[in-house]
Image (tube, rainbow, N blue to C red):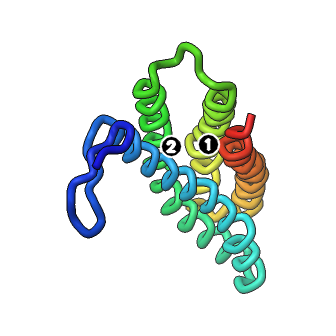
Amino acid sequence: MTMKGFVCAPGPFGVLIGPNMLYVTALFVHLLCAAFWVGGMATMHFAVRPSAVATLDQPPQRLRMMAATLRRFFVGVDASVTLLFATGVAMILAGGGFRGLHWRIEAMMSIAIVMAAIYAYIRASVFRAMRRAVDENAWPAAAARLNTVRKLVTVNLVLGVVVFGVATIGRAG
């Protein structure tokens, strides 16, 4: 049996083989990375941070915990952002290149560039300063940097939701 661009091998589930398999694999990785990044921001913003405030009485405890949590999360975001751009460009090239892209692809790419720039600023500047302040027990400075991270993550979370909206609702137009 064949489908456009696929060959389905016999078996209980079938096996997709063909040029579109690379596209489908890239799309799968792309969606996983987007879900990790945006979902992780939502989790940090709506669950982890409020829980730290509610359960850890002293600012040093909260700030150490948030620094450690963000450090671990950012490792995954580093990989996700890299893979998002790699798979996004791969899918664009597989679809015929940058010429004549649908408006929603251009919108997603533009918003992704803004989000990545905000993340790079958080990662390379604000978070680094926060960790340094935590290491030096400079709690007011660490709290101020964490608050900056929170505000920038809020912006990126909103932009990430917009990208999901463009990706899905934009298909209708």
Q: Position of residue 150 (x, y in %)?
A: 74, 56
Residue 99 located left or right of residue 121 = left
Q: Earlier in the sequence, mark 2 or mark 1?
A: 2
In the rendered image, the vertical position of residue 53 relative to residue 5, given as above or below = below
Q: Residue at x 45, y 40 (%)?
A: 82
Residue 150 located left or right of residue 84 = right
Q: Which residue is mark 2?
A: 81
Q: Can you tell which quarter of the image residue 62 is in?
A: bottom right
Seen as rendered, the residue at the extreme top is 99
Q: Which residue is mark 1?
A: 119
In the rendered image, the vertical position of residue 126 relative to residue 103, given as above or below = below
Would you say residue 156 is visible in this rendering? Answer: no
In the rendered image, the vertical position of residue 103 relative to residue 83, given as above or below = above
Q: Residue at x 68, y 43 (%)?
A: 163
Please tell me whether mark 1 sits on a helix, a strand or a loop. Answer: helix
Kind of residue indicated by mark 1? Tyr
Q: Nearer the viewer, mark 2 or mark 1?
A: 2
Q: Residue at x 65, y 59 (%)?
A: 41
Q: Position of residue 162 (x, y in %)?
A: 74, 45
Seen as rendered, the residue at the extreme left is 10
In the rendered image, the vertical position of residue 120 relative to residue 142, given as above or below = above
Contact between marks 2 and 1 (CB within 8 A): the answer is: yes
Residue 150 or residue 127, whichever sits in front? 150
Would you say residue 94 is visible in this rendering? Answer: yes
